[in-house]
Each structure stands twice: as structure tokens, then as C-alpha cells.
Amino acid sequence: MLLVPLLTSQSVLEEDQVFPASVSIILPICIVSLTASAGSTGIPLQQAWPYLAGSIIGGLLAGWTGKRIPAKWLHRGLGLLILYGGVRYLC
């Protein structure tokens, strides 16, 4: 929630470069976290498959549609999702 706005305001990246840059920052962090947790607790892969499949499909759809949707609408959509998550968390 913080990385994309920070990259937008604090870097020289164009708006269409911010989202791929954020993924390239987050991906190594996720791999290290996965490796660390897999070594200590084990990963219940059968329980994780639905989430992994959804993530892969969602990533492919986002990559395909992200180039066709103006950045302004992507920012608004992200803002609405963050607000929705906050309201659900509070209620």
C-alpha cells in the first residue's frame, strides 16, 4: 500500500513504470520470506494451491489489462480496494 505511492512521488519513474518496478521490489522479498518459512514450518502445498492458482491468474490478467486501463483509474481502483479492506477490517 505504500510502495506504489512512494515510487510515484519519490522516484523519476513514469507512471507506467511504477507498477512493474514495485513487483520487482516485492518479488525478492517474497522469495526470501517463503524460503525462510518453508525451512522452519513447512508449507501445506495442498492448502496453498487455490491461492497460488488465483495469484497466477490474477497476475496474468493484471498484466494484460493494466496496459489498457489508464493509470488514473488504476489508482482509483486501488484506493477503493484499500478503503473496502479497511472497512471490512473494522466491522
Image: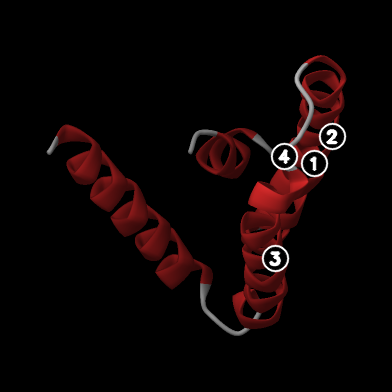
Q: Is residue 82 visible?
A: yes
Q: Which residue is mark 3?
A: 53
N-terminal of the pair, mark 1 or mark 4, is 1
The spot of residue 3 in percent (x, y) is 58, 36
Residue at the farthest bottom position: 68
N-terminal of the pair, mark 4 or mark 3, is 4
- Label 3 or label 2, whichever lies nearer to me, is 3
Looking at the picture, which amino acid does disc 4 mark? Answer: Pro
Q: CA distance from mark 4 to mark 3?
A: 15 Å
Q: Quadrant of residue 59?
A: bottom right
Q: Secondary structure at mark 4?
A: loop
Q: Which mark is residue 31?
A: 2
> Which quarter of the rendering shows the C terminus?
top left
Q: CA distance from mark 2 to mark 4?
A: 16 Å
Between 22 and 10, the one lying in front of the other is 22
Looking at the picture, which amino acid does disc 1 mark? Answer: Leu
**Marks 2 and 1 in Cβ contact (< 8 Å):** yes
Q: Secondary structure at mark 2?
A: helix
Crowding at label 2, few (<14), some or many (≥20) Cα neighbours within 10 Å?
few
Q: Residue at x 67, y 49 (%)?
A: 48
Q: Which residue is mark 4?
A: 44
**Marks 1 and 3 in Cβ contact (< 8 Å):** no
The spot of residue 82 in percent (x, y) is 34, 47
Residue at the farthest top position: 40
In the figure, is residue 42 to the left or right of 68? right
Crowding at label 1, few (<14), some or many (≥20) Cα neighbours within 10 Å?
few
